[in-house]
Image (tube, grey):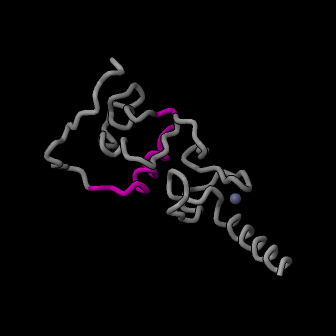
Amino acid sequence: MTKKSNDFNRNPNGSNQWETRSNEEIQIIINRHPKNWTKKDFRGEGKNNQKKILTRKETERAGLVFGNKGGVKQYLNGKLKCSMCGFFKNLDEFPDDKYGSSNGKRSNCSSCDIIRNQKYRESVKEIS
Ligand SMILES: [Zn+2]
């Protein structure tokens, strides 16, 4: 295995037998699997898994968080760690944030978001 393998297009005609899945759907699939799985494993080319779960195109998509990559987001058993309360929660418990980093989700969970908004409103009140 060389690191030189160029990122050539394996599917030049764009013919895909796979339905186009959204990043969120793909992220959910990734989250369901062990966090030591690499992109290769999801393509069925790795040592943890030989079954094709995601296409190359899907694994190369920007914005996906693979467990093996240390990033801002912390995952455990498919759950994301809330940056405020520190609990691991399901992705759907996080508010959508299209400006949010990597997965389009707020880094804090919905319940914390409510608290955060309340605090914000209070702080605004104090100033005015
Ligand atoms: Zn929280």
Q: Which of the pair 49/24 is nearer the observer?
A: 24
Q: Is residue 47 magenta?
A: no
> Image quadrant for the C terminus?
bottom right
Residue depicted at x 64% and y 50%: 81
The answer to which image quadrant residue 46 occupies is: top left
Horizontal arrangement in the rendering, residue 118 relative to residue 71 (left or right)? right
> Image quadrant for the N terminus?
top left
Q: How many marks?
A: 0
Residue found at the very far top of the displayed protein: 1
In the rendered image, the vertical position of residue 76 relative to residue 68, given as above or below: below
Where does the image place residue 109, in percent across and percent down from the top left? Answer: 64, 61
Residue depicted at x 50% and y 58%: 104
Residue depicted at x 58% and y 50%: 79
Residue interval drawn in magenta: 20-37
Residue depicted at x 34% and y 46%: 58
Where does the image place residue 42, in percent across and percent down from the top left? Answer: 38, 37
The answer to which image quadrant residue 19 occupies is: bottom left
Where does the image place residue 41, in percent across and percent down from the top left? Answer: 39, 33
Q: Is residue 25 magenta?
A: yes
Horizontal arrangement in the rendering, residue 27 relative to residue 1 (left or right)? right
Where does the image place residue 123, in percent across and percent down from the top left? Answer: 81, 73
